[in-house]
Image: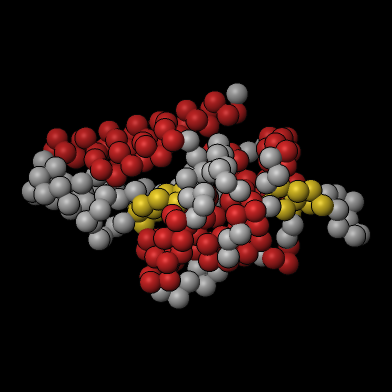
Amino acid sequence: MSEIPLLDAQEQRVIGVLIEKSLATPQYYPLTLNQVVTACNQKSNRDPVVSMMEDEVDAILSRLARRAMTTQVFVSGSRAGKWRQELTSELELDGPSMAVLAELLLRGAQTVGELRTRASRMKAIADMGELNRVLEGLAQHQPPLARRLTPPGIQRGVRWGHLLQSDERIKSMSEFEQEDLDPVAGTTPVPRVERGSVASVPENQSLATTVKNLELRINELAARIDDLEKRSS
């Protein structure tokens, strides 16, 4: 595969689910249509949490099949066809690389610490050194599949994102990471406000900077919602 396979948000969720289940619960893989729907809509290990309909997922699976990314198979003793993904075979990815890519597809950009913890539920990743080797492998893959979003020189809170999405989306994430830097030091990440929590503002951080970062987060969430609405219409 010489070109990056671009996926919309819903296609990312479906492919991510199929990769995840092939590693985490191989005894139940490939998946029926109903199992794919349930996995897409589950509340754990997903960001954002979505509510996709069966006919919607069926259409996505068929669309991906036309691009040779999924295949419907008929297992002996089962009347319903089951679905498997072909993307990671085409890309010749090993288990740890599959797990990291699946996490990026299912939850978007994440820190290296988050990726190691979350991907390890699918495939063991011994330490941060191994994770960094996996990420560099994805970045240097042909075609490249992941990119470091945090600017060079920063060692803490380094975030990575996958490249199986539009250039506009990737550019937006990279700009968001750049804006997250302290405007004076230029190298220290501004503390992030985690979902569902209220963070205290450091004394040396201006109110204007705080407001700016919150505006960026709101704009990013609005873009996600807009994309989902366009896909569902």
Name the side, left or right, on which 177 lies relative to 78: left
Query: Residue 72, image x and y in percent?
Result: 79, 48
Q: How is the image coloured?
A: secondary structure
> Which percent across, then down, holds residue 36?
69, 49
| Front residue of 140 and 172 | 140
Left or right, residue 184 beside residue 170: left
Residue 68 visible within the image = yes
- Where is residue 167, by image quadrant? top left
Looking at the image, how many numbered discs can be counted on the residues?
0
Percent across and percent down for residue 12 are 57, 44
User: In the image, is residue 86 above or below residue 171?
Assistant: below
Q: In the rendered view of the protein, which quadrant contains the C terminus?
A: top right
Q: Residue at x 14, y 35 (%)?
A: 208
Residue found 54% across the figure and 55% down from its top: 102
Q: Is residue 44 visible from the viewing direction of this image? A: no
Q: Nearer the viewer, residue 152 or 29?
A: 152
Locate residue 21: give its quadrant: bottom right
Left or right, 217 with respect to 40, comes to: left
Residue 73 coordinates in the image, percent (x, y): 82, 52
Which image quadrant for residue 5? top right
Q: Which residue is located at x 43 percent, y 71 percent?
A: 130
Q: Residue furthest top?
A: 233
Q: In front: 29, or 51?
A: 29
Say whether residue 97 is left or right of residue 22. left
Residue in view at x 29 percent, y 44 percent: 177
- Furthest toward the bottom, the residue is 126
